[in-house]
Amino acid sequence: GQSLEQPSEVTAVEGAIVQINCTYQTSGFYGLSWYQQHDGGAPTFLSYNALDGLEETGRFSSFLSRSDSYGYLLLQELQMKDSASYFCAVSEDDKIIFGKGTRLHILP
Amino acid sequence: KAGVTQTPRYLIKTRGQQVTLSCSPISGHRSVSWYQQTPGQGLQFLFEYFSETQRNKGNFPGRFSGRQFSNSRSEMNVSTLELGDSALYLCASSSSGNLPNEKLFFGSGTQLSVL
């Protein structure tokens, strides 16, 4: 079957760096993506990794290791507006499967 | 370009009723996916449509169904509503054709409450 594991909650301090990990088990894997969702809002796309390595987009970076079925999202220079839920998601064939999400709390 | 539009935004129904939710994808997007979101359960995949054909379906009972029209607009229907069907139903569109979906654009969702 398919499964994605990520921590349910993470707490960090404003200005710091935080890493959200994701491990997955799927039958057909094409890539790992990350989405951000603020309370009451729709999920928005952050990044997509199809190949091993690190992808950087501004303050956010995403990493993938296909051999370890593992990836992470790295958020730098945390801001209060980064308080949200973050979902990892696996692309397989014609569907995208999401993890249960990590709630990021940021302390001032 | 307009984003993904879902209607209605909120819906209150009673057990046993049926409901139809609507989704208009971003212009030019032919793939539409539906997800159910409940607190603590993340986004659970319902089904995906491309060019009026259902390409994939999640592990939901047959009470959940959908369809896609020639203009790519999609509807999902839930019959014989149960209390546990209360959730946020999200629609997402993608420009991916025969390639695996890489990036989804979500609508604001329809919040369904079953009393």
Image (cartoon, coloured by chain):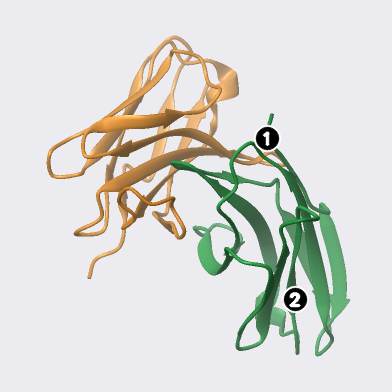
Answer with the quarter of the image where residue B44 lies: top right
Colour green belongs to chain: A
Number of other residues with Cα within 10 Å of mark 2, as a class: few under 14, some 14 to 19, many 20 or more: some
The disc label shown at residue A74, or none: 2
Task: Give x and y (percent) for residue B17.
Answer: 39, 13
Q: Report the front residue among A101 and A90.
A: A90
Labelled disc at residue A17: none
Chain under label 2?
A
Residue at the image position 31 percent from the left and 46 percent from the top: B31
How would you rate the neighbour count of disc 1 (Cα within 10 Å): few for under 14, some for 14-19, many for 20 or more?
Answer: few
Type of amino acid at the residue the image marks with label 2: Leu
Label 1 to label 2, Cα distance in Å? 24 Å
Q: Nearer the viewer, mark 1 or mark 2?
A: 1
Q: Are marks 1 and 2 in contact (CB under 8 Å)?
A: no
Q: Quadrant of the N terminus of chain B?
A: bottom left
Q: Quick one: B65 or B101, which is closer to the camera?
A: B101
> For mark 1, what is the residue?
A2
> In x, y percent, where is residue A108?
84, 84
How many numbered markers are drawn? 2
Drawing shade for chain B? orange
Query: Residue at left 50%, top 64%?
Result: A44
User: Helix, strand or loop at disc 2?
Assistant: strand
Up/down of B38 relative to A69, above or below: above
Q: Are marks 1 and 2 on the same chain?
A: yes
Read off the chain for label 1.
A
Relative to A86, does residue A97 appear above or below in the rendering?
A: above
Residue at coordinates 20% horizontally, 58% vertically from top-left?
A: B28
Is B24 situated left or right of A75 in this image?
left
Residue drawn where x is 17% and y is 35% of the image: B69
